Amino acid sequence: MPPRQLRQECLWERVLPPAPPASRLGASLRTQVCVIGGGITGLCAAIRLLERGYQVVLLDAHRVGHGGSGRNVGLVNAGTWIRPDDVQATLGNAVGERLNRVLGEAPARVFEIIARHGIDCQAHNEGTLHMAHNAHGEADLQARHDQWRRRGANIELLTGARCREYCGTDKVSLALLDHRAGTINPMAYTRGLAAAVERLGGALYQDTPVTGLQREGDAWRVTTADGSVEADKVVIATGAYTEGDWNSVKNDYFRGYYLQVASVPLGGPAAEAILPRARGSWDTRTVLSSIRRDDDGRLLLGSMGRLDNKPAWFVRSWADRIQRHYFPELGTVEWECHWTGAIDFTPDHLMRLYEPAPGLIAVTGYNGRGNTTGTVLGAAMADFVIDDCVADLPMPFSRSRPVSVPGLRTGLYEAGFSLYHAGQCLRVVL
Ligand SMILES: Cc1cc2nc3c(=O)[nH]c(=O)nc-3n(C[C@H](O)[C@H](O)[C@H](O)COP(=O)(O)OP(=O)(O)OC[C@H]3O[C@@H](n4cnc5c(N)ncnc54)[C@H](O)[C@@H]3O)c2cc1C
């Protein structure tokens, strides 16, 4: 039989019922806080504001989940991508430790909000696995383990039979099991947050790109094509998907891409042996591979770079190569769909929190870790809007630090990732 057509579409959206009808802004409104961006950050900011009795209008240029929030791998990770000692070295002891603590506890905040708002999103809090691919990777995991254990984190190193059982492959000799972490369907989480915003009385407008932002007396005027919002305060949460020139957030990151390929639902003992407990994992390669399962038994593979500009045979060939390396006993796997999303990278791999002017607060630079970071930073920005207390923020405000030649960086990264994936397909590297 010829392979089925490989569709370019995001699995997370396809497995959900159609999104509820959306309203566009077509009037001039007055509110206390206007939130721009309907991803996890903006929605969590809106929820906290509404729960604390504030009026909120939230605007998104497209539909809720259009950005990274609807397309990501769904790993609910603790901490940043870089090791906690490196966070401390970059930000200083006090700030670094505060950020490590807040983001170390962040998965618990995600699972709490899911439970509080009854969000049905394939949530599993059984940990994630960081898998060593060679001796260098083993040393990295050992260091991460030691650094987090010193901070009291619930993580453990797996070796031998336990490692094989958790990972479902004998290609991994050491894995770091993070009991704090887990997995979700990120689009279902995002839509669940949006439903909570509306239930709490927030006004949510979609397909409404913001085109301007001006100070008018003591307030801010947020302009859109067919309307505007006058607000005392504005939260900007547009991340890697920032559109328009009305804010300068996008000067402070460069775009990188992340691809995913999903199989058809798989059954049988070979499929069930893959990641049977902690369902989300990634390896220690510089151009990493992520591996996870969904609730229907699909195998999802991911990596840095884009596939939306590559032919279907390349996508299949890359996915086959990774699957056959880690899980050869599956035999031939049919791949159902693939999709790509954009990430806001910063040169030091840490996020930026800004107060560009009184009454404006913005965040960006999650570097590919936004399910947890967006959840806690959204709420923290809301608290700042209300309490005006810098000491309560997970990190201090940054000055704008524009990234030099962002387009060139994006291009060079992408060329490197494409070459690496081609090398994987040709079996030159893995
Ligand atoms: C493929 C991929 C895999 C990833 N995997 C993981 C993972 O496993 N775990 C993890 O924690 N993180 C992961 N990330 C990162 C994570 O998805 C993001 O950091 C996070 O979703 C960012 O959320 P956000 O709300 O800040 O921004 P987004 O979700 O990007 O939302 C921004 C919103 O702003 C809107 N917007 C932009 N401009 C305007 C405008 N002018 N007017 C109005 N609205 C506007 C956009 O339409 C968009 O909906 C991944 C990212 C990608 C792309």
Image (tube, rainbow, N blue to C red):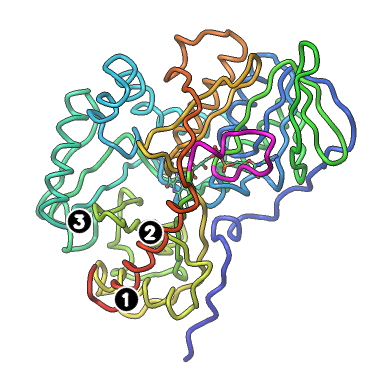
> What is the number of the mark on residue 295?
none
Q: Which residue does the numbered mark 3 point to in the structure image? A: 165
Residue 42, x across and y down, in percent: 61, 32
User: Percent position (x, y) of residue 24?
Assistant: 82, 42
Q: Residue at x 59, y 19 (%)?
A: 382
Q: Nearer the viewer, mark 2 or mark 3?
A: 2
Q: Residue at x 46, y 65 (%)?
A: 262
SS under mark 2: strand
Can residue 267 be found in the magenta stretch? no
Against 370, residue 382 (above or below) is above
**Where residue 425 is drawn, which disc sits there?**
1
Which span is picked out in magenta? 240-253
Question: Quadrant location of residue 357?
Answer: top right
The quarter of the displayed image where residue 330 is located: bottom left
Q: Secondary structure at mark 1?
A: helix
* Badge 3 element: helix
Tag 3 or tag 1, which sits nearer the N-term? Answer: 3
Given contact means CB atoms under 8 Å apart, are the residues at marks 2 and 3 in contact? no
Query: Disc 2 marks which residue?
Result: 303
Q: From the viewer's perspective, is 99 left or right of 227?
A: left
